[in-house]
Amino acid sequence: MEDIVRDGGDGGSVDESWAVLVAGLQRYCPEVLAWIRPAASPDDLRLAEETLGRPLPADLVRWWQLADGMTKHTSLIPQSYTPYSVREALSDRRTWLEVSAHADRYEPDDYDECLAAPAGTGCSGWFLPQWLPVAGDDAGGTLFVDLRFGHANGCVSKMHTGWSSGPAVWTGVGAMLEEVAEAVRRDRKVRGFRIWVDAQGVDWDDDLWRWVHPGGRSGPDPEQLRHRYRALTAELRVGGFAEPSDDWPAAWIAATVKRNTEVLIVTAEAIAATEPGWDDEMWVAYNKQAGARYRGQSLADTGVGRGIRYDNTGGLDPTILSRYARAGLPDLADDIDVLGDRLLETSASFLDRRPAVYARIVDDGVVLADEIVSWWGILLALYWRQLPIRIRQLQTLRQT
């Protein structure tokens, strides 16, 4: 039998998008490349078509001809989906269909109506035989291509343990990969999340996570954070940056780090001046805040006053940044080294505590938070995202 070949479709864009993804992994997390399986065999592709009784979309065939899924969990598709091999796809489909045979307990939609509906139509309570999983999230969720008939044939939808599939998320595998490639290439959002690839693997960040890490029960290792500051100032001292036409120049990037570190120091010194009992008061206020949010109330309705505060807009004042930038990269690098050390020394004085502060976080003109958050969550985000983002911006300017 001849190999499966599809003319037209999104094969070209799949090749280009996949090349961008592989290049991103190669640059920031080469270990993950070893987890990508070789191309699917023609026999497996034929088996998939025979099992479903219909042809596979051209973009899906091309994707599997480039890589037959991954050997380990890797959140390559937002927010936490790992691509399947052909065999994994067929196995997951079989599992869903077997469980779906008992769907009457979920008050499902009419089965025959779901079968006859055009591709892309949501369905509650059933997993249909015309659906083929292509990625899973290790928590019961599945991305699948919808092979029912209609103009949306081949679209990608989600099924989760709540037994409900909504409308199509992407028009096809090619469109899905193209969005992820744009996220790698230009830091574009995909379904509300931004991709982040580093030595730890692949993550998809909510905008706020880049400013306040959700796991902020304890702070980052002081020496590791110091090393991160030193890595940034080392980039500044190497120099050789191009002047971008549509983005911040190197001096503005450095000025932003300097100013934000100053703002962080003010907050850290205010925390250091408090007694440990203040932490308990703030977490009581945090719980009141959570209750107010649940009831649809504002923070003011809790009766909690606003005490120590971190406002990241203080690090984005263009007048201050312009003045700082004029100092030049060598002086900025020296200032950042000194300020980074001061921030670390101040925060080290209360490492055994779990402080919380009021934070107002604004990014790209959007208020992401105006609430109580963990102080260590702010410093973890500084270590895991804010400083690495600035380092990559500098490296990009050097490569331009």
Image (spheres, rainbow, N blue to C red):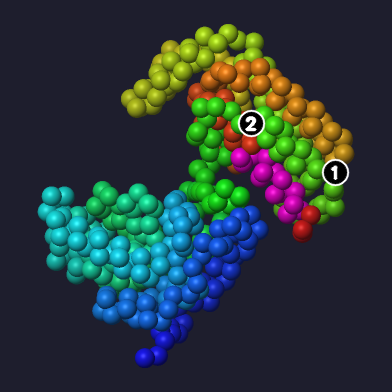
Tell me if residue 390 is in the magenta stretch. yes
**Left of 321 or right of it: where is 36?**
left
Q: How many marks?
A: 2
Tell me which amino acid carries mark 2. Answer: Asp
Tell me which amino acid carries mark 1. Answer: Arg
Provide the residue designation for mark 1: 237
Q: Position of residue 369 (x, y in %)?
A: 51, 31
Of the numbered discs in the image, which one, if any, rests on residue 250?
none
The C terminus: image quadrant? bottom right
Mark 2 vs mark 1, foreground winner is 2
Q: Where is residue 373 in the image (x, y as percent from the top left)?
A: 51, 26
* Quarter occupied by residue 253: top right
Residue 323 visible in the displayed image? no
Residue, x 55% and y 63% (percent of image)? 34
- Secondary structure beneath dot 1 equals helix
- Comparing 167 with 79, the one in front is 79
Provide the residue designation for mark 2: 221
**Start-end of magenta stretch:** 384-397
Residue, x 39% and y 61% (percent of image)? 135
Mark 1 or mark 2, which is nearer the start of the sequence?
A: 2
Mark 2 to mark 1: distance in Å? 25 Å
**Left of 183 or right of it: where is 283?**
left
Q: Residues within 10 Å of mark 1 (few under 14, many from 20)?
A: some
